[in-house]
Image (cartoon, coloured by chain):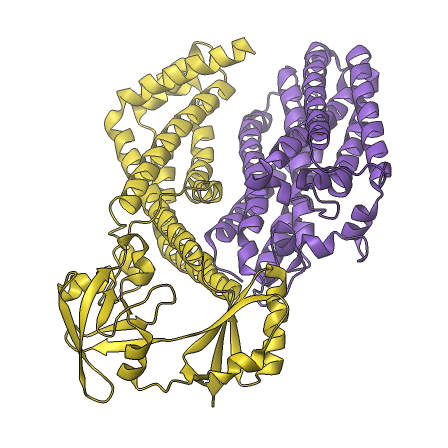
Chain colours: A yellow, B purple
Amino acid sequence: MKKLILRQKYLIDFTLSSLKRRLAKNLGLLLVYTLIVFLLASVMLFTHSLRREAGIILESSPEIILQRLVAGRHDLMPAEYLDRIGRIRGVTRKAGRLWGYFYDPAVQANYTLMVPRDRDLGQQEVVIGAGIARTRGVDVGDFLTFRSSDGRAFSFRVVDILEADAELVNADLLLVSEGTYRDFFGIPADRFTDIVLQVRNPSEVRKVAEKLTVLLPDARPILREEILRTYDSIFSWRQGIVFVLLGGSILAFVIFAWDKASGLSAEEKREIGILKAIGWETSDVIRMKFWEGSIVSLTAFLLGFILAYLHVFYGQAALFEPVLKGWAVIYPSFNPTPFVDGLQVATLFFFTVFPYTVATIIPIWQASITDPDAVMR
Amino acid sequence: MLLNPAIMALIGVSAVVALLLLLAAGFAIQVMRHWDIGSGSELQLNLERRTYLISTILSYAFVAELVSLLLFVYNAEAMSTQFVGAMCATGVLNVDPWGWPTLFLKIAVFFAGGVWLILNRLDNQGYDYPLVRVKYALLLAIVPLVIAEAVVQAAYFLGLNPDVITSCCGSLFTPESEGVAAEVSSLPPRTAVTALYASAGLALLSGLATLWRRGAALLFAGSGLLAFMVALVAIVSYVALYVYEHPHHHCPFCILKSGHDFVGYYLYIPLFAATVLALGVGALAPWRRIPSLVTAAAVDIRRFTWLSLMGFVLFYAVATYAVVTSNLTMQGVWW
């Protein structure tokens, strides 16, 4: 065992010094390799952290949202529906929600107005998201004025700005009191936007939703797991699309690697010839070349991955943000939580190291069967 | 189909590996027809050189297959959020009828590849390549397996439809339903535990016998394979229950999750390694009397038997530990 390890150690030693002798050529390969890993790893880390972020956000959202549909369009929910639902076994809490969208012509952006359930606000008080604060340039104590649906001007005093760490969801949020909300949009007191239900046991959610559709035929239940599933598939689909687009560059890289590995210089051929003349076997040369490939791959993989990590988690993924996240006027600036998982690393390995290895097998073998006398003559 | 990077990687890897193996198979046919170690003809020289290429291709291909087996299970686990009713890999494998066959084929390819590499290693130690025809005949037998795996896997991924309501481990691995999974789970724990330790005894004793007398190697390979199958059944019907500390949760995949301290990896990795080594020992044994291989075969059989035994011991130790330290008490119900 010890002999085996020592043998590999000497081979690696030799390979490293031989790589050093042709530094320029190998640096070129390393650069391209690193770039490929960097691109793919950035896409991967970024979409994955978006998925996770969505999951974390939805974790505390209600299990079921109930919307009323009139002629296939979303309509306001009569408050008496809460009574009509009555007591369904498994539902721990049910409540009507008030929220809506408001277009602000001043900055040409849409805000989300909402009545908070956990804080009491005065008639003229408003809590705003960090995105709005940034776009409108307001701070706590400043006033915001909007025109309501019937043309009256409403002035609000900013009493608080929502925490920036959840900016993905609250960047465009305005929290107002229930009275103000109804007055502003002209919504009667017996109407809600939708109803939310909390269900304790996840395996009962579907049954509860089924009961709801029987009780309220004009209502549509939306399950949290459905939203999560949609996010999941949308993000992996987007990631897949980018990967397909990058497929061309992977192919170019494979051709490049093939070319580099097969285009041995006269000097390299001589080197292999001498090695074989002094007693190296074909399998030894293959092993040496294997270590050469592993060293290059490992260096490029680690470098590319670390660069991608910095790019995504500290540089806001500047290169891919518009494609993968979407675009809007009030855009949340957010720093995704750093997270790496094995599945991503393994997938990335198959997209970069595997093609490189396959592309170099035949050139390596061709180099290793060189006859000493043929090159030294 | 879902355009997911891991799926694209898996399909791509299987396709490339199948292509590489087809290339190797073409060469294998040439070797079987023209190989003549005594000849110094140019053809023979070329064939001898080409064997290096084939060994390299195959070792790379089988490493890729091994990683892709892991990725497949891991990916199934990760996709469980995208299917209605799926809560772990079991649900995702059930979405399409090709799911389980893909997993089984991947495991079969892993074993076949491992045995081939062990045989190849032995052959390369003999100066006259005495096993070259055997080796390439075996390779020709593996090729259809690899191609089948690539095709079945592609069919599985193409057939994945997120609208299908799948049944998860909770409902699949319950004694009341029908099918292989249910049969496996409905096995009484008492039978499972007896079978587990009986097969353990058989495998360990035959392994020790192999160390003493090489002739027992075939018995060791057979009992190793038996122990592997019994172990999988026992994990589903008995060990997993103690890991989950729940008398009705039979699932071979959830034990891989962090919530159960990744105990699944400690079970599966030694088990798979030990089984493939035991099979390899069985494949080496018939050739131990070939003059150019006598010493090499003796060393290899001994070494691989030891490693395999260590793997089995580790697996049984972890399985026993998981049961003994569990908070689940079934005294009076099962025992």
Decide if residue B13 is on the left or right side of residue B228: left
Image quarter where the N terminus of chain B lies is bottom right
Can residue A75 be seen here? The reply is no
Nearer to the camera, B121 or A340: A340
- Residue beneath the point at 63% across and 28% down: B117
Decide if residue B5 is on the left or right side of residue A253: right
Measured as percent of width and height from the top left, residue B57 is found at 54, 34
Nearer to the camera, A106 or B234: A106
Image quarter where the C terminus of chain B lies is top right
Q: Where on the picture, by quarter, is residue B281?
A: top right
- Residue beneath the point at 66% across and 21% down: B123
- Residue beneath the point at 25% across and 65% down: A127
Decide if residue A362 is on the left or right side of residue A35: right
Measured as percent of width and height from the top left, residue B243 is found at 68, 38
Measured as percent of width and height from the top left, residue B249 is found at 71, 48
User: In the image, is residue A191 above or below residue A253?
Assistant: below
Nearer to the camera, A230 or A83: A83
Can residue B318 be seen here? The reply is yes
Measured as percent of width and height from the top left, residue A228 is found at 48, 61
